[in-house]
Image (cartoon, rainbow, N blue to C red):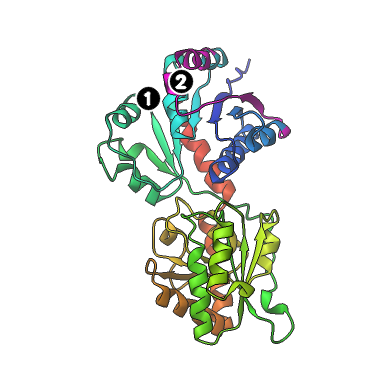
Amino acid sequence: MAVKLKQKKICFFNSCSAWGGGEKWHFEAAEFLSQHQFEVSVAAAPGSPLYSKAKQAGITTRSVKVGNLSALNLFKILGLANWMRREDFDVVILNLPSDLKCAGLAAKIAGVRRVIYRRGSAIPVKNTVLNRWLFGNLLDDVLANSEETKKTLLVNNPNLFPAEKIHVIYNGIDCNAGCQEEMTPAVKFVDGSPFVIGTAGRMSRQKNQKFLVDLAVSLLQVGRDFKVRIAGDGPLRNELENYARQCGVLNYFEFLGFVKDVDRFMQGIDLFVLPSHWEGFGYVLVEAMAARKAVVAFDISSNPEIISNGETGFLAPFDDLNAFTEKTCLLMDEPELRMQMGRNGYARVRCKFDKKNNLKMLAGILLEGM
């Protein structure tokens, strides 16, 4: 008589109320594993996009509220521990630092076999007594979304956590949907239409869209005709629009706000640029490359892991306006080079950033030693 093996029980614990790259990864990973012989639960903030999407996908959900002071709330920690013990989870995967402090401790109290922290920000971890205790006593593994994120985990203390237990799994894109057919370049408009430079992201200091205003001024000084389309919204939108107005280039910008159909946005541009100060993993660069767009970004953080300089786009020295302008102009003037870089980028995405392959890596890691 065949013995039916118990499915591994995985809990994705993510208390963030907003929707971002981390939440997207948690949802896609939970959905994938639930379809591949894992029993999956998602613990998320009530009413959050992650909670709603998981519930709609038929994944077991639990609403959780975790804040910066939750780690001091013994009743909350013990309540989570009792729930985890009843569910008999094999693995709990945590998202936020506050999740680590509260739910990570609860998981250890409950006797969860493996506690994993998924890190998606390339910001150095402070070498504090608390962090040394958290990483040394609560965690069994860490998932990083790039080699740069892995490096920043240990930059302030190489002994914070064993490097061999930090697994790099890139955010992936579905290469079997939306990026199969070669797209018509945006220069499909009537002769004389301006070259379209696109970018996408939340309007924040980190994303550094203000640099694009300086880029626009620089491009005008060398006689280029163009439009800059910005997909995304955020707290700095008014400041950005005012800065563009002050510099006399507001008419060269199109502020689209939040864009749901990213594929369509990518089809409407000629070149994708990303002026961020840092990126844990520049997923939007992968989206642009999947749409066969050449890209220009700064040579910082995880960008060199995504962009092959000179093959799929260009990496400019950080905050170097002259170099960024030069690379942008080159791609404006050389359509064949731009199209070839777009094709190269698409091939690189299929090879390195295929979502299904990367989530299979995750499944393999979760099954190790279990």
Which residue position is annotated with label 2? 107
- The amino acid marked with disc number 2 is Ala
Q: Is residue 63 magenta?
A: yes
Residue drawn at x 47%, y 17% as measured from the top left? 77
Residue drawn at x 37%, y 69% as measured from the top left? 317
In the image, residue 145 above or below residue 140: below
Q: Where residue 267 sits in the image (x, y, percent)?
A: 68, 67
Residue drawn at x 34%, y 30% as measured from the top left? 135
Q: Is residue 179 visible?
A: no
Specify the label residue 288 is tagged with. none
Which residue position is annotated with label 1? 138
Label 1 secondary element? loop
Q: Residues within 10 Å of mark 2 (few under 14, many from 20)?
A: many
User: Is residue 216 found left or right of 115 in the rendered image?
Assistant: right
Distance Cα–Cα, label 1 vs label 2? 8 Å
Q: First in sequence: mark 1 or mark 2?
A: 2
User: Is residue 131 found left or right of 253 in the rendered image?
Assistant: left
Q: Is residue 44 magenta?
A: no
**C-beta proximity under 8 Å, tags 1 and 2:** yes
Q: Residue 239 occupies which quadrant of the picture?
A: bottom right
Q: Where residue 175 sits in the image (x, y, percent)?
A: 63, 55
Q: Residue 163 occupies which quadrant of the picture?
A: top left
Residue interval drawn in magenta: 56-82
- The amino acid marked with disc number 1 is Leu
Label 2 secondary element? helix
In the image, residue 45 above or below residue 212: above
Where the N terminus falls, by quadrant?
A: top right
User: Is residue 297 found left or right of 24 in the rendered image?
Assistant: left
Q: Where residue 328 sits in the image (x, y, percent)?
A: 50, 77
In the image, residue 360 above or below residue 101: below
Q: Residues within 10 Å of mark 1 (few under 14, many from 20)?
A: many
Residue drawn at x 55%, y 27% as measured from the top left? 10
